[in-house]
Image (tube, helix red, strand yellow):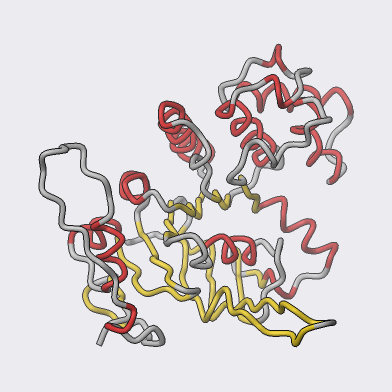
Amino acid sequence: MTGTIRLVTVSHLVKRFTRGGFLRRASSVTAVDDVSFTIDEGETFGLVGESGSGKTTTGRCILRLIEPTSGSVTVRGRDVLALSGTELGRARRDMQIVFQDPYSSLNPRMRARHIVEEPLLIHGLGGRESRRARVAELFGLVGLDPGHLDRYPHQFSGGQRQRIGLARALALNPSFLVLDEPVSALDVSVQAQVVNLLMDLQERLRLTYLFIAHDLRLVRHICSRVAVMHRGRIVELAPAAALFDAARHPYTKALLSAIPVPDPDRPRHRLSLDADAFDSRAPLRQVSGGHWAAVP
């Protein structure tokens, strides 16, 4: 696309965790295995897969909430993994995360006002009155009543708590947000409201999203491109329409076949996945324009 600006580049990202030790022999588990992709400015890039596929670990490694084992991550051409503590702190003003669980991600002993204000205090931005004004502005931006700023998290609904988390993430005017299953813990009736808010804010604030999810129907609706993860590796990456209409990898096909259909009388053809039917170490290859899959 002419004029597209690449915002994020992830290259050969690896994350290994060591478990055991002391009374038993330590072992290594590879959660993210040679993952590479790019995200363009203003894009909503989807990262999907089953629980344990490595998608959340990938998102946290990009922000260095978890330190990667190897690989590189650049944001606006700057190598995030090479930044020192002070430099990383400044860089984090431009990249934030919205966590999955609005119940555990907010401090229950802090009022909503202080939760949203906290990033401003950490980065030493503004005086007391300007911070108070900014917090009220953010509350209104995410569709909450500024008159409720002195309430505690337990006094808000799940959807409202997620909006508070979003307001906190937006406090520093970031351009890139990692959305880690941001609506999966919410009631279905509330999910659409939060998703619509995210899309509206993206347009108004020119945000770029890495949208981590397992709800494929939602991903199809909001993401421009989608990467599918299986056992720590990307097995397919394509524009959303191409992925859903012409998936090539057996794992992707099995995932898509599990999507519920609204018509209960419509016949289902759910595919079972035979892990021995494909090479889990196969590299991605281009199968059509912008469509990559780990297939022969």
Front residue of this view, candidates 1 and 159: 159
Q: Nearer the viewer, residue 134 or 182?
A: 182
Instruction: Name the quarter where the C terminus is drawn.
Output: bottom left
Q: Residue at x 37, y 60 (%)?
A: 226
Is residue 245 placed above or below 141 in the rendered structure? below
- From the viewer's side, name the closer residue of 28 and 293: 28
Which residue, as the protein is rendered here, is positioned at the far top?
147
Rendered view: 207 above or below 190: below
Q: Position of residue 88 (x, y in %)?
A: 77, 62
Q: At 53% across and 70% down in the image, what residue appears? A: 9
* x then y, percent, for residue 16: 64, 79
Say which quarter of the image contains residue 124: top right
Residue 77 vs residue 105: left or right? Answer: left
* Rendered image quadrant of residue 69: bottom right
Q: How many numbered marks does the figure carry?
A: 0
Q: Quadrant of residue 170?
A: top right
Q: Residue placed at 53% from the left, 67% from the top?
A: 54
Q: Is residue 26 left or right of residue 215?
A: right
The quarter of the rendered structure image containing the N terminus is: bottom left
* Place of residue 143 in the rendered image (x, y in percent of width and height, measured from the top left): 56, 22
Toward the front, the furthest residue is 23
Q: Residue at x 41, y 26 (%)?
A: 189
